C-alpha cells in the first residue's frame, strides 16, 4: 500500500507541475505582451518555425522563443506561418503575433499615382517603395500578349489602362497581382461611366483621355480640349499636341521642346502623323475619361496656354495667332 500511495503522490505532484507549466505557458502566450515599442520585422520566405521564433525573440517582439514555438507546434500551424514584412505594436502578445503571422497580415505600403503618370514613372514609384522592382513591373505591363489577355482588346502594353489612384501593397508583391489590382480599379471606373473595359473602342477613348489629361489639369477645360480633338480629327487636321512629342522622345526629352523635336519620327508624334497616336500616352483620371466621352459642343480648333494653368481657345487660326502674339508680347514685358 505504501508503494501505491507513493506512486499516487508522485502522479499528483507531476500533474500539478504540468498544470502549472501549462498555466505559465498560457499566461506567457495569451497575456504577456513583451515589447514596449512598435517593431517592424521581416520574415524571409522559407524560414522555419524555430528560426521564426528565435528571430521574434531576437528582435524583441516576444519574451520566449520556446513558448511561441511550442504553441505553434501544438496547434499544428507551424507550416502555415506566412513570410513578409510585419508591424507588431507595443505590448502585442505572442498569441496576437502568432495570429498575425498565421493570417499573413503583412504591413502594407501606400503608393499614390497622380493622374497623367506613365508606366515608366509608375515603375519608379513602385521600385522606390520596395513593392516590386522596376524591371519586373515593366516586364509585365509592357508585355503585349499579357496586355491583350487582361484587357480583351488589341493593345501592345497597359499604358493608360492602369488607373491613377492611391493603393496599398505589401513589400515584394508579385507584379501581376499589383497590376491586376490597378486594372480592377480601371474596370470599376469604366463601369461608373457606363462603359466596359473590353468594348472595341476603349483604346480610342483612353487614348483621347490621355491627351486631355496631359494638356490640361483644369477640369472645366477638359471637355473643351476633347472638342478640339474631335473637331481636328473630323477635319483631317493633325492634332499637333506637344505632350505626344514628349512621349515620343522618351528619355531623350530634356525638359524643352525644340523645333527639331516636332519632326521627330514616331507614330506617337502628332506633329508628324495624322489621327490619334497608336495608344494612350499616360494614365488619365476620371474627369479626362468622362471628357473623352462627352466633348463640349463647341467648334474650337486651337488653344494656347496663357501661362497660369488655363488656356485660350479659338475657332479660327487668325484668332489663335493673335492670342499667341499677345502672350508673347506679355512675356517680354
Image (cartoon, grey):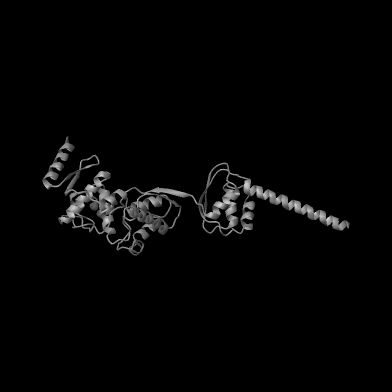
86 sits left or right of 127 in the view: right
- Give the residue at the far right of this rendering: 1
Q: Nearer the viewer, residue 62 or 293?
A: 293
Residue 112 drawn at (x, y percent): 38, 48
In this rendering, would 219 be left or right of 12? Answer: left
Q: Position of residue 103 (x, y in %)?
A: 53, 54
Q: Inspect this view and state whether residue 186 appears.
A: yes
Residue 235: x, y in percent? Answer: 15, 55
* Residue name at image x 20 percent, y 52 percent: 229
**Quarter location, residue 141:** bottom left
* Figure disc tally: 0
Name the quadrant of the C terminus.
top left
Q: Is residue 261 visible?
A: no
Q: Quadrant of the N terminus?
A: bottom right
Judge by depth and name the residue closer to the eye, 66 or 77: 77
Q: Is residue 33 left or right of residue 149?
A: right
In the image, farthest residue toward the front? 194
With respect to residue 109, does 151 lie above or below?
below
**Residue at point 68% right, 48% down?**
24
**In the displayed structure, would residue 308 be above or below residue 139?**
above
x and y, in percent, of residue 266 in the image: 22, 58
Residue at the extreme top of the image, as rendered: 333
Amino acid at each position: 500500500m505504501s508503494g501505491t500511495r507513493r506512486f499516487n503522490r508522485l502522479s499528483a505532484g507531476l500533474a500539478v507541475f504540468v498544470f502549472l507549466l501549462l498555466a505559465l505557458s498560457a499566461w506567457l502566450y495569451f497575456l504577456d505582451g513583451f515589447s514596449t515599442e512598435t517593431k517592424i520585422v521581416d520574415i524571409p520566405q522559407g524560414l522555419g518555425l524555430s528560426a521564426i521564433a528565435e528571430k521574434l525573440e531576437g528582435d524583441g517582439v516576444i519574451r520566449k522563443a520556446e513558448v511561441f514555438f511550442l504553441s505553434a507546434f501544438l496547434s499544428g500551424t507551424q507550416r502555415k506561418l506566412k513570410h513578409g514584412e510585419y508591424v507588431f505594436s507595443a505590448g502585442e502578445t505572442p498569441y496576437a503575433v502568432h495570429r498575425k503571422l498565421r493570417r499573413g497580415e503583412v504591413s502594407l505600403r501606400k503608393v499614390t499615382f497622380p493622374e497623367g503618370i506613365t508606366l515608366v514613372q509608375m515603375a519608379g514609384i513602385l521600385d522606390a517603395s520596395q513593392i516590386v522592382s522596376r524591371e519586373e513591373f515593366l516586364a509585365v505591363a509592357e508585355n503585349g500578349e499579357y496586355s491583350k489577355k487582361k484587357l480583351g482588346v488589341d493593345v501592345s502594353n497597359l499604358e493608360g489602362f492602369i488607373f491613377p489612384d492611391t493603393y496599398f501593397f505589401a513589400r515584394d508583391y508579385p507584379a501581376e497581382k499589383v497590376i491586376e489590382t490597378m486594372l480592377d480599379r480601371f474596370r470599376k471606373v469604366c463601369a461608373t461611366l457606363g462603359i466596359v473595359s473590353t468594348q472595341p473602342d476603349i483604346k480610342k477613348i483612353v487614348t483621347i483621355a490621355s491627351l486631355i489629361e496631359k494638356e490640361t489639369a483644369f477640369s472645366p477645360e477638359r471637355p473643351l480640349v476633347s472638342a478640339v480633338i474631335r473637331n481636328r480629327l473630323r477635319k483631317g487636321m493633325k492634332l499637333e499636341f506637344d505632350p505626344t512629342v514628349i512621349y515620343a522622345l522618351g528619355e531623350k526629352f530634356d525638359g524643352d521642346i525644340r523645333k527639331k523635336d516636332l519632326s521627330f519620327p514616331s507614330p506617337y508624334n502628332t506633329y508628324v502623323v495624322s489621327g490619334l497616336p497608336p495608344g494612350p500616352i499616360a494614365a488619365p483620371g476620371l474627369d479626362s475619361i468622362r471628357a473623352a466621352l462627352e466633348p463640349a459642343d463647341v467648334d474650337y480648333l486651337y488653344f494656347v496656354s496663357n501661362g497660369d494653368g488655363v488656356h485660350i481657345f479659338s475657332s479660327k487660326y487668325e484668332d489663335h495667332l493673335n492670342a499667341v502674339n499677345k502672350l508673347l508680347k506679355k512675356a517680354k514685358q
